[in-house]
Amino acid sequence: MTTISSVGMAVGALSSGPLTKFGKKNCIHATNLVVILACGLCLVKSLGVVLTGRFLYGLAGGAFSVFVPSFINEVTPTELKGPFGSSTQILITLGIMISNLLGIPFPTKDDINTHSFVDDQYWRVLFALPIALSLIQSALIFTLFNYETPKYLKQLGRSAELNIIMGKIYSHDQVQSRIDAIVIASGGSGGPTYRETLTSPKYMLSTIIGCTLSLMQQLSGINIVMFYSSKILDSP
């Protein structure tokens, strides 16, 4: 059940890039719908249905790993990209910690009482929680943050909307210079191909560093600690 979610994340992360041409905001809304569907399936007490839901949930998680950082990167002023990127990683780590702490109420095998809510229904609460978070996120994007990224608006030539959004981010005297600084690549999504990422001198060093850090993270054994954190924290 855990592994199939990870497979879904890999598929989602690798296949979501081309979808950004429809706009990051629209992609985030669509991914939230996938999360709601996935979590709804996970509430059904059937192994096959739950596994399907877990795969879709992983698919959405992988897609979010593409859409959300891209959205933040394109909205954030250049001089603040570092702090915003770091704060995003800190909040992701905090979210992982909170989600693992929510597993503490589960009893050990010796203490199972099938008549209690925690034993029989609490798992549904955990599976349903992302539905509430997705609804909150989409509601905020529909209301307070109802705009696309400046790069996307410039790419489509929607100058009026672009000027409004840039006016919210920068002072009036900076708007035009910031708009002129937005680079729109010609053709495709503007990013390097997989072959360029692995072989081009421009990207190869960054790719090696990123893959090495990910490899070191996995070899450290942190996933085992995370998967069994509730049992570790519950042990005397």
Image: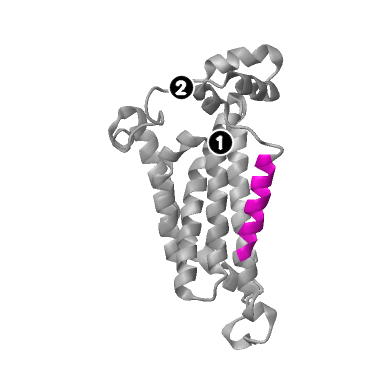
- The verdict on residue 139 being magenta is yes
Few, some or many residues within 10 Å of mark 2 (<14, 14–19, 20+): few
> What SS does tag 1 mark?
helix
- Residue in the picture at 64% in, 16% down: 175
Q: Residue at x 47, y 58 (%)?
A: 56
User: Against 69, is 46 above or below?
Assistant: below
Mark 1 sits on what residue?
71
Q: Would residue 216 be visible to someone looking at this image? A: no
Of the two numbered discs 2 and 1 on the same chain, state the one appearing first in sequence: 1
Three-letter amino acid code at disc 2? Ile
Where 59 sits versus 229, above or below?
A: above
Label 1 packing within 10 angstroms: few (<14), some (14-19), many (20+): many
Instruction: Give the vertical position of 54 relative to 67 (above or below).
Output: below
Q: Which residue is mark 2?
A: 184
Q: Is the magenta region chiefly helix, strand or loop? A: helix
Magenta range is 128-142
